[in-house]
C-alpha cells in the first residue's frame, strides 16, 4: 500500500499546532535572570536605546533628502504612531512581565508560528540596527581624525561598487561592536552603569544643542527663498515619518528587559511612557533648531548637528556635539546588544531556537552565548553593509513588529481570564472575573441591534472582525499611497474604493468594540486599530527593495522554524507523553495489517501529524 496524502483531519491538527498559544498563566515572575533594574534604570535604558543615530544622523538625512524643515512634522507623525504602539506595549508589559517583548506578546495571543516570525523579525531588527549604529559611530569618530581611517582603508583596500555593500570595509565599526559586546557580557549591572554615564553626557549635549541652536536661529531659513517649510510636499513628510521610525525603537528595549526589572508590572509601563515623551520632545526640538541654524539644503546628511555649528563658525560647539554623538550612539549600541540576546534567550527557552542560546552564565547571570555570537554577527554586518540599507530595513522591521503587537492586544483582550482559584482565594480580582461575562460575548444592551452576531461562539465574531479590519486597513492604505500613481485608478474608482474600505474598517471596529472584554488600558480597540492603520501606511512609503529584503529574511526564518523550532517547541514536547502510547498502537496496527513500510515510530512525527 503506497503512501497517500495526509488526511483533512491530520492537516487540521497540524495547523492547530502552528497556532498553539503559550498559556498566559505560565508568564510568572520566576526567572533565572537577575532582577536588578529599577524604574529609573529602565527609563534611562529606554532613552539611551532611542536617542542616538536617529538624532545625530537621521535628522540631517530626512531634512535634506525628504522633508526639509518639515522634518519636525515627520518626527511628530512618527511619535504619534509610536505612542499608539507604546500603549499596547504598556498593557503587555504589565500583563506578561517576561523577557522577549513582542515575541512573547504574540505567543500568548496569536500563536506559535506568528510568534516565531515576529521573534525572528525583532532579532534581525536589533542585529541590523546595532550594525547601523556602529557604522554611524565610526563615521563620527573618523571625522575627529579628519577621515584618516577611511582614507587609509580606501587607499589600501579600494572602493567597492557592490549593491547594498558599503564603499569600503569599516574595521572601526566592527571593533566598536565587539567592544560593546564585551561590556554587555559582564552583566546587566555593569552595562547599566556604563549606559548611565554615556546617557548623562548625551543629555547634556542635547540641551546644549537646543539652547545654542535657538540663540543662533534665523527664521529666514524657513522662508520661500530657501525653498519653504515643506519643499518636498506631503509625500516627503510621510516618507520622512516612515524613515523616522528608526528613531523610536527604545521602548521595546524596556519591554524586552522586564524579566530583569524589580517590579515589572509597575516599572515597565511607567518607563515606556516617560521614555517616549522625553525622546519625542528631544527629536522635535533638535530638528527644529537645526533647520533654523542653517538652510536645510546645506546640511551634511551624515553629521548634521555638528556640521550646522561648523558652518556658523562655532568649531568648538561642533566638537562638543561630536563627543555627544559618539556617547549617544554607543549608548544605543549597548542597548541593542543588551536586548538582542534576551530575545533569543526567550525563544530558546521556549524551544523555538537553538538551546545553546538559553544558557545563562552562573556568575554574571546573562545569556553570554547569545551576546558573543550575535555580537560577532553584528560586527560582521557593520564591517560590510551600507548604512542606508541598514536604516531602511530596521524601519520596516519596527513597523511590522508594532503592527503585530497592536493586533495581539486586540486578541488578548478577548482571552478568557484564568480561573479565580489561580489568583488566590482572597483575591478581589478573581471574584470580579468569576462574576463577569465571558470575554467575546456581546453586551446585553447591544444584542437587540447586533442580533446577527448572537449565534457566533464567543470570539468567533472577534476573529472575523479583526481579519476584516486588517484587510480593510491594507486596502485603504494602498489606495491612499498608490491610488493615483501605481494603480492608475480613475477618480470614481479611487473614491469608491476609498469609501468602501473606510466603511469596512469602521464596521469591523464597531463589531470589535461591542463584545465583552477585559478592561485594562482604555480605548481598545480604537488605539491598536489606529496603530495598525498608520503602521501599514508608513510601511508602504518604503522602497520595494526594502520589502524584498524583508520577505527573503522571513523566508529564511520559516526554514529555521520548520527545520528546528516546531520539533523542539516546549508546547510540542508537553504533548509527547500523551501521544507515545498512540504511536505504539499505530505501529502495532500497521504491522498487523502487513503495512509494507510501517509507520514512523518517532514521537515527533506523531505529534505533528497525529
Image: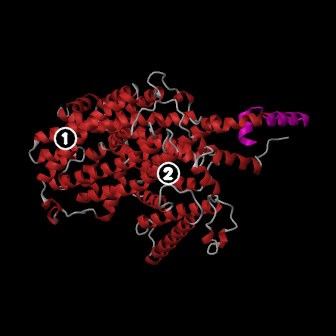
Label 1, residues with CA under 10 Å away: few <14, some 14-19, many ≥20 = many
* Residue 484 vertical position relative to residue 365 in the rendered view, above or below: below
Q: Residue at (16%, 48%) from the top-left corner?
A: 308
Q: Give the alpha-carbon distance from disc 2 to disc 1, as whole Å.
A: 36 Å
Q: Which residues are magenta?
A: 581-610
**Numbered tag placed on residue 329 in the rendering:** none
Q: Position of residue 321 (x, y in %)?
A: 19, 41
**Residue 499 part of the magenta segment:** no
Q: Secondary structure at mark 1?
A: helix
Q: Position of residue 547 (x, y in %)?
A: 45, 51
Which residue lies under the disc numbered 1? 321
Q: Residue furthest top?
A: 363
Report the front residue among 459 and 243: 459
Q: Quadrant of residue 263?
A: top left
Q: Is residue 170 left or right of residue 532?
A: left
Report the front residue among 451 and 17: 451
Q: Residue at (11%, 41%) from the top-left corner?
A: 315
Q: Position of residue 182 (x, y in %)?
A: 37, 25
Q: Secondary structure at mark 2?
A: helix
| Residue 167 seen in the current view | no
| Residue 96 seen in the current view | yes
Which residue lies under the disc numbered 2? 405
Q: Position of residue 438 (x, y in %)?
A: 64, 58
Amino acid at each position: 500500500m503506497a503512501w497517500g496524502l495526509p488526511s483533512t483531519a491530520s492537516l487540521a491538527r497540524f495547523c492547530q499546532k502552528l497556532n498553539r498559544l503559550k498559556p498566559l498563566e505560565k508568564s510568572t515572575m520566576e526567572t533565572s535572570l537577575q532582577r536588578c533594574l529599577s524604574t529609573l534604570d529602565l527609563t534611562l535604558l529606554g532613552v539611551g536605546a532611542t536617542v542616538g543615530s536617529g538624532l545625530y544622523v537621521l535628522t540631517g538625512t530626512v531634512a535634506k533628502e525628504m522633508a526639509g524643515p518639515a522634518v519636525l512634522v515627520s518626527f511628530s507623525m512618527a511619535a504619534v504612531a509610536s505612542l499608539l504602539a507604546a500603549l499596547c506595549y504598556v498593557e503587555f508589559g504589565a500583563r506578561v512581565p517576561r523577557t522577549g517583548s513582542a515575541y512573547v506578546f504574540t505567543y500568548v495571543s496569536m500563536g506559535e508560528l506568528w510568534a516565531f516570525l515576529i521573534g525572528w523579525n525583532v532579532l534581525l531588527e536589533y542585529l541590523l540596527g546595532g550594525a547601523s549604529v556602529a557604522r554611524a559611530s565610526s563615521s563620527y569618530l573618523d571625522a575627529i581624525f579628519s577621515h584618516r581611517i577611511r582614507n587609509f582603508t580606501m587607499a589600501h583596500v579600494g572602493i567597492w561598487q557592490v549593491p547594498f555593500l558599503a564603499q569600503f570595509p569599516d574595521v572601526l565599526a566592527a571593533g566598536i561592536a565587539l567592544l560593546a559586546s564585551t561590556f554587555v557580557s559582564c552583566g546587566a549591572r555593569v552595562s547599566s552603569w556604563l549606559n548611565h554615564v554615556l546617557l548623562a553626557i548625551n543629555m547634556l549635549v542635547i540641551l546644549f544643542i537646543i539652547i545654542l541652536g535657538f540663540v543662533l536661529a534665523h527664521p529666514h531659513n524657513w522662508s520661500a527663498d530657501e525653498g519653504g517649510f515643506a519643499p518636498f510636499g506631503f509625500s516627503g513628510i510621510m516618507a520622512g515619518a516612515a524613515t523616522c521610525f528608526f528613531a523610536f525603537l527604545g521602548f521595546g528595549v524596556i519591554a524586552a528587559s522586564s524579566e530583569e526589572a524589580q517590579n515589572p508590572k509597575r516599572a515597565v509601563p511607567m518607563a515606556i511612557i516617560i521614555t517616549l515623551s522625553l525622546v519625542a520632545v528631544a527629536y522635535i526640538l533638535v530638528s527644529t533648531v537645526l533647520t533654523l541654524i542653517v538652510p536645510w539644503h546645506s546640511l551634511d546628511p551624515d553629521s548634521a548637528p555638528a556640521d550646522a555649528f561648523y558652518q556658523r563658525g562655532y568649531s568648538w560647539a561642533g566638537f562638543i556635539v561630536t563627543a555627544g554623538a559618539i556617547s549617544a550612539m554607543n549608548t544605543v549600541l549597548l542597548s541593542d546588544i543588551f536586548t538582542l540576546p534576551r530575545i533569543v534567550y526567550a525563544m530558546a527557552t521556549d524551544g523555538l531556537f537553538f538551546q545553546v542560546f538559553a544558557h545563562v552564565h552562573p556568575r554574571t547571570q546573562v545569556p553570554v552565548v547569545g551576546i558573543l555570537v550575535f555580537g560577532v554577527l553584528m560586527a560582521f554586518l557593520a564591517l560590510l553593509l551600507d548604512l542606508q540599507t541598514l536604516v531602511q530595513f530596521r524601519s520596516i522591521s519596527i513597523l511590522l513588529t508594532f503592527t503585530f503587537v497592536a493586533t495581539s492586544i486586540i486578541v488578548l483582550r478577548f482571552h478568557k481570564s484564568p480561573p479565580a482559584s489561580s489568583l488566590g482565594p482572597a483575591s478581589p480580582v478573581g471574584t470580579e472575573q468569576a462574576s463577569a461575562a465571558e470575554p467575546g460575548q456581546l453586551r446585553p444592551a447591544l444584542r437587540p441591534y447586533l442580533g446577527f452576531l448572537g449565534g457566533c461562539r464567543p470570539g468567533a465574531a472577534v476573529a472575523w472582525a479583526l481579519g476584516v479590519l486588517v484587510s480593510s486597513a491594507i486596502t485603504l492604505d494602498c489606495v491612499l499611497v498608490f491610488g493615483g500613481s501605481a494603480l492608475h485608478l480613475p477618480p470614481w474608482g479611487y473614491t469608491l474604493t476609498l469609501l468602501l474600505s473606510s466603511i469596512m474598517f469602521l464596521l469591523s471596529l464597531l463589531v470589535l468594540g461591542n463584545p465583552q472584554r477585559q478592561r485594562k488600558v482604555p480605548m481598545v480597540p480604537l488605539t491598536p486599530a489606529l496603530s495598525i492603520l498608520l503602521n501599514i501606511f508608513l510601511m508602504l512609503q518604503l522602497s520595494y527593495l526594502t520589502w524584498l529584503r524583508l520577505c527573503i529574511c522571513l523566508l529564511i526564518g520559516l526554514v529555521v522554524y520548520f527545520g528546528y523550532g516546531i520539533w523542539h517547541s516546549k508546547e510540542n514536547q508537553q504533548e509527547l507523553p500523551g501521544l507515545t502510547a498512540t504511536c505504539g498502537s499505530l505501529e502495532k496496527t500497521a504491522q498487523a495489517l502487513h503495512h509494507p513500510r510501517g509507520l514512523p515510530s518517532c514521537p515527533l512525527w506523531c505529534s505533528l501529524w497525529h
